[in-house]
Amino acid sequence: MARIIVVTSGKGGVGKTTTSAAISMGLAKKGHKTVVIDFDVGLRNLDLIMGCERRVVYDFVNVINGEAALNQALIRDKHCEALSILPASQTRDKDALSLEGVGKILEDLSKDFDYIVCDSPAGIEKGAHLAMYFADDAFIVTNPEVSSVRDSDRMLGLLSSKSRRAELNQEPIKEYLLLSRYSPDRVKLGEMLSVQDVQEILSLHLLGVIPESKSVLNASNSGTPVILDEKSDAGQAYADIVARYLGEDKPHRFIDEKKGLFGKLFGSK
Amino acid sequence: MLTDSEIMTCSAPVLEFKSSTFSVPVIVLSNNDLVAIEEHLRKKNLLAPDFFKNSPVVFDVQLLNQKGISIDIEDLTRVIYQAGMLPIGIRGGDELQNSKARELRIPAYSSLHSVSAESGKKVVQKNTKSATAAESPTTLIITHPVRSGQRVYATGDLIILAQVSAGAEILAEGNVHVYNTLRGRVLAGVQGNTEARIFCSDLQAELISIAGNYKISEDLNDSIRNKPVQVYLQEHSLIIKDIL
Ligand SMILES: Nc1ncnc2c1ncn2[C@@H]1O[C@H](COP(=O)(O)OP(=O)(O)O)[C@@H](O)[C@H]1O
Ligand SMILES: [Mg+2]
């Protein structure tokens, strides 16, 4: 049985798709058979970030409607054997997805994969609900600002009441906080919430902090998940996150502001 | 037992009966004055519009029957519908009231109290406070965070061992205890119990209310914020004090 991870937030533009691409690649690179699914029907962009947009023949909706078999729609990643992508449709509207349809696909994928990563659309409506409904684990992507934190809190409420696990009275979905686009300098200036602030408001297990980084834009322009840019801070942050999720003990990084040359030379902390 | 995978396949049964427990507000009537009832429901609605709009409710006519006051079930349900609530049950009704309710497709629940009285006849009525005792309220204990957008309603006391987020709403007919940070809206004594109190270990609430007397966040001064406090009612005004 695969473990189903939903990457969600409530708010748009916080880094869900960036995160879905990075962690699915990270899990696959560690040898776990992984599939990442784009639930953002009508706005597909996971395939762009994964650099496979020119290989899309069939999509998620085709499979649900029985117009294509699952293995016809799955795209094998060009960097990593163990990773597959199930793209969203650009031409359908959100109502094309149904709970039964999604459930059936996840069931089928569960037989072949170790991890299923669901990239949720923004909002708390149907698309986001379908993406999280069957989840075992939830990665809550939050930016260090009040509105994003509030939306994440709202999403956490839905996870604990409107998911399959909640409805069947099973062990609740495991929730992890990913604080993204973090900029210690701006936190210091009081322009952003700090890690502590966010954790205090959400009281959630912190899986990792992803710094605001130019490397994310570069990665998406070149269609390679940022985790493959091993020299970049964001790439390393995602590698840490995957390792921690898999049970490794890694100290948190990217929380303190960058030290200037002076600080580095004298190792002041 | 079916596994999840079996539920998903086409050959699975079309439905299953599951047992679930719901927390539903109960309207306990002590008077048959429909105009007064309508007015009261309207005020409740103003206090917690999100909570009562389209909320399922059970109405309890036991007190009326004890006092020998009659009420027209059809008129009563109409008033409840008009207030935006959805009646899903009658409790404590007599045979006639229950069959009238069934005609309106509203199921009848047996009253906890009358059942025990029938089966034992030994149940000693504490006659002094029988009016409140008849409700037999239960304490609701919540161990997980109450998140933004969520609402919790207790017919008795409400005890919460995790945080209550901004944008969450917790309501109790009795006392409310929050042994964590309280950031949302908290309403105690929502059926008019002026003796109800609110206790919390870190007050940052958006709204606090006891029996309809409320204060909003702006009214809370810094001396009582971010620390353990209790809130109670004294001559229609809310008193907020350190617990210790
Ligand atoms: N850590 C980061 N640093 C800088 N830019 C980022 C970071 N994470 C995401 N972005 C940018 O933010 C935008 C939204 O990201 P995306 O992953 O598409 O969010 P979502 O899927 O939540 O809508 C994109 O332009 C992306 O390049
Ligand atoms: Mg996205």
Image (cartoon, rainbow, N blue to C red):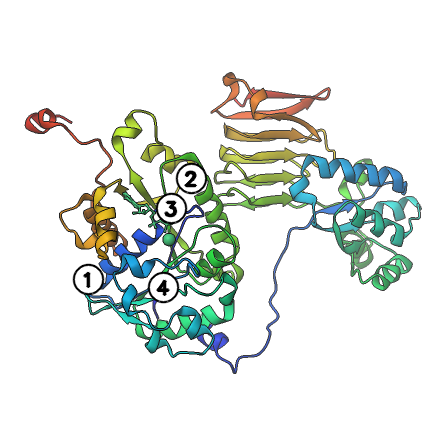
Q: Is residue A249 visible?
A: no
Q: Amino acid at mark 1?
A: Lys
Residue B113 drawn at (x, y percent): 78, 51
Residue B126 drawn at (x, y percent): 79, 40
Asked if disc 4 and disc 1 are in contact, CB closer than 8 Å, the reply is: no
Asked if disc 3 and disc 4 are in contact, CB closer than 8 Å, the reply is: no
Could you tell me which quadrant the N terminus of chain A lies in? Answer: bottom left
Q: Nearer the viewer, mark 3 or mark 4?
A: 3
Q: Which residue is mark 4?
A: A37
| Protein chain holding label 1 | A
Secondary element type, mark 2? helix
Asked if disc 3 and disc 2 are in contact, CB closer than 8 Å, the reply is: no
- Mark 2 or mark 1, earlier in chain: 1
- Mark 3 or mark 2, earlier in chain: 3
Same chain for labels 2 and 4? Say yes or no. Answer: yes
Q: Which residue is mark 1?
A: A29
Estimate the spatial distance between the alpha carbons at disc 2 and disc 4, rounded to whole Å.
25 Å
Q: Nearer the viewer, mark 1 or mark 3?
A: 3
The numbered disc on residue A149 is 2
| Protein chain holding label 2 | A
Asked if disc 2 and disc 4 are in contact, CB closer than 8 Å, the reply is: no
Secondary element type, mark 4? strand
Q: Is residue A229 visible?
A: yes
Could you tell me which quadrant the C terminus of chain A lies in? Answer: top left
Identify the residue at horizontal 50%, vertical 43% (top origin).
B147
Mark 4 neighbour density, 10 Å: few (under 14) some (14–19) many (20 or more): many
Q: Amino acid at mark 3?
A: Gly
Label 3 within 8 A of ligand 1 by Cβ = yes
